[in-house]
Amino acid sequence: MLVSPIVIQVEHATAAYDGRPVLRGVSLTVTAGEVVAVLGANGSGKSTLVRAILGLVPLTGGAVTLFGTPARRFRQWRRIGYVPQRLGAGSGVPATVAEVVAAGRLARRGVFRPARSADREAVAAALRAVGLADRAGDPVATLSGGQQQRTLIARALAGQPELLVLDEPTAGVDAASQEAFADALRGFVAEGGTVLLVAHELGPLHPLISRAVVVHHGEIAHDGPVPSPAGHHAEPGHDHVHPHAPTESSRMWSA
């Protein structure tokens, strides 16, 4: 039986803010092709876990390995597409949707190299994947919040990563955008991609999830099938996870 390669390995990770423990000895493995949802209540440590995996939050103990390389030595950031918590794709910059999405190619082609046909094709494919092909030339500032978030996901997809990391991608966005997210992720996974996403509620993403990790007070309280909300709410601690309910960038990504 073939064993899928390990994409993310977290071993006994600890992290703290101002001396207050946020992660308490967390261990987690994500293998190629999985779609893993990190669930939990606000303040549980789920976003900190994902940011620590990407090196955006320093660990006070433990270790992270990405694609078999210790995170402190990992440099192949083109293999990872990251969509942070909703920041707004425009951020006051008068850029078009296509220009924002094209920034996702920089890690792959380099900052000083001109765009080639492969770059333009990747941008067009990413825009189609999130249902924004008809808005490519529009200023990002004219889009709705959900459409701006779809633009950020397209930016990550344009880099053609192997791993897509999303921090609450559907929080506070409209139903149409949630469905577009689900369609885009479905296509990404069908092509062999791996997904790690943080969520409070899964909505239309639920059918795509192969495994759920529930974080509670900085520890993993559950690692397995998506918990049923009926009467349990992802115990322990009544973390209010409703899988059925619809509803910064860093040094590594220069857009």
Image (cartoon, helix red, strand yellow):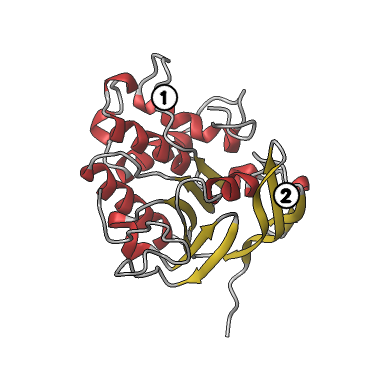
Q: Which residue lies furthest to the bottom in this view?
A: 1
Query: Where does the N terminus fall, quadrant-wise?
Result: bottom right
| Residue 238: percent from left, percent from top | 41, 61
The image quadrant that residue 150 belongs to is top left
Image side of residue 35 versus residue 68, left or right: left
Left or right, 161 with reference to 55: left
Between 241 and 137, the residue placed more toward the observer is: 241
Q: Which of 92 and 118 is in front in this view?
A: 92
Secondary structure beneath label 1: helix
The residue mark sitting in front, 1 or 2, is: 2
Say left or right for 83 vs 22. left
Dot 1 crowding, Cα within 10 Å, few <14, some 14–19, many 20+: some
Q: Which residue is drawn at 55% across and 32% down?
A: 249
Q: Where does label 2 land, which residue?
A: 71
Residue 163 placement (x, y as % from top left): 54, 53
Question: Picture coordinates of residue 168 (x, y %)?
Answer: 42, 45
Q: Give the amino acid at mark 1.
A: Glu
Disc 1 marks which residue? 99
First in sequence: mark 1 or mark 2? 2
47 up-or-down from 2: above or below:
above
> Could you say which is closer to the camera, residue 93 or residue 78?
93
